[in-house]
Amino acid sequence: MRVRRVACPGSFDPVTNGHVDIIRRAATLHDEVIVVVGANRAKHGMFTVDERVAMLEEVTAGLPNVSVETFRGLLVDYCRDRGVSAIVKGLRAVSDFEYEMEMAQMNYRLAGIETLFMTANPLYSFLRSSLIREIAAYGGDVSSLVPPPVEARLRARLAELAQG
Ligand code: ADP
C-alpha cells in the first residue's frame, strides 16, 4: 500500500498553537506528516533552525506519525526526494490567499506537487509567529497562543537578548 506522506512547511520561528492545530489535523487525515523547517532565510530569525526543530519535536512528541525535518533550496525538490505527495498549508484569512495560491500554482507547475489547504481554527486565525515575537518582546502574555515549552524558550531568549 502506498504511504500518503504530506509536508507542512514553514519557518516556525517559533511554532504557535495555530501551527500545531494544522499539524494535528493533517496527522489525522494522512499516513505521515513531515513538518519541514525552511532553512533558506533562517539566519535572520529569533531562533536557530535547530532550536525551531527542537521545539517542534517537543510539541509534536505525542503524534506518532509526525516527524520534523529541515530543507534548503526548493520545497518541490525536497518533496520529490522524500516522496511527499502533497503540501498542506493553513489558510488564516483572505490575506493569505493570494500568496498561497501563487505558491501552490508555481509548485504544481514546477513539479506536479499538489497543495491542500485547511482553514485555520478561528481560535488561532489571527496568530502568526512574528506577532508572537513582538508581543513577547514587550512583555505581553502569550501563554494561550504558544505551547508551554515555546513560551519558556521565548522567555529565555528574551532574557538573553536583554543582557546583551
Ligand atoms: P507565520 O510566521 O506566518 O506563522 P510560517 O511560515 O511559520 O508563518 O507558517 C507556516 C504555515 O503554517 C503558513 O504558511 C500557514 O499555512 C500555516 N499557519 C501559520 N499560522 C497559522 C495559524 N495561526 N493557523 C493556521 N495555519 C497557520
Image (tube, rainbow, N blue to C red):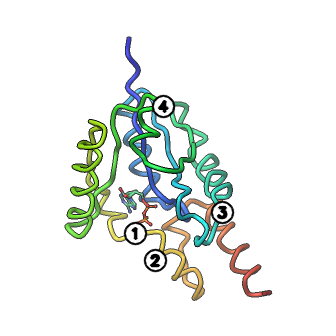
Q: Quadrant of the N terminus?
A: top left
Q: Nearer the viewer, mark 3 or mark 2?
A: 3
Q: Residue furthest right?
A: 163
Q: Amino acid at mark 1?
A: Leu
Are the residues flagged by discs 2 and 4 in contact, CB closer than 8 Å? no
Whether label 1 lies within 8 Å of ligand 1 gets the answer yes
Q: Which residue is mark 4?
A: 82
Check if mark 3's residue and mark 2's residue have beta carbons within 8 Å. no
Relative depth, front residue between 81 and 65: 81
Lower position in the chain sequence, tag 3 or tag 2: 3
Q: Secondary structure at mark 1?
A: loop
Q: Residue at x 52, y 36 (%)?
A: 66
Q: Residues within 10 Å of mark 4 (few under 14, many from 20)?
A: few
Name the residue type under label 3.
Thr
Q: Which mark is residue 48?
A: 3
Cα separation, mark 1 vs mark 2, equals: 7 Å
Q: Nearer the viewer, residue 118 or 40?
A: 40
The residue tagged with tag 4: helix, strand or loop?
Answer: helix
Identify the secondary structure beneath mark 2: helix
* Label of residue 127 in the image: 1
Q: Quadrant of residue 153?
A: bottom right
For the residues labelled 1 and 2, say whether their Cβ atoms are less than 8 Å apart.
Answer: yes
The residue under label 4 is which amino acid type? Arg
Q: Ligand 1: which quarter?
A: bottom left
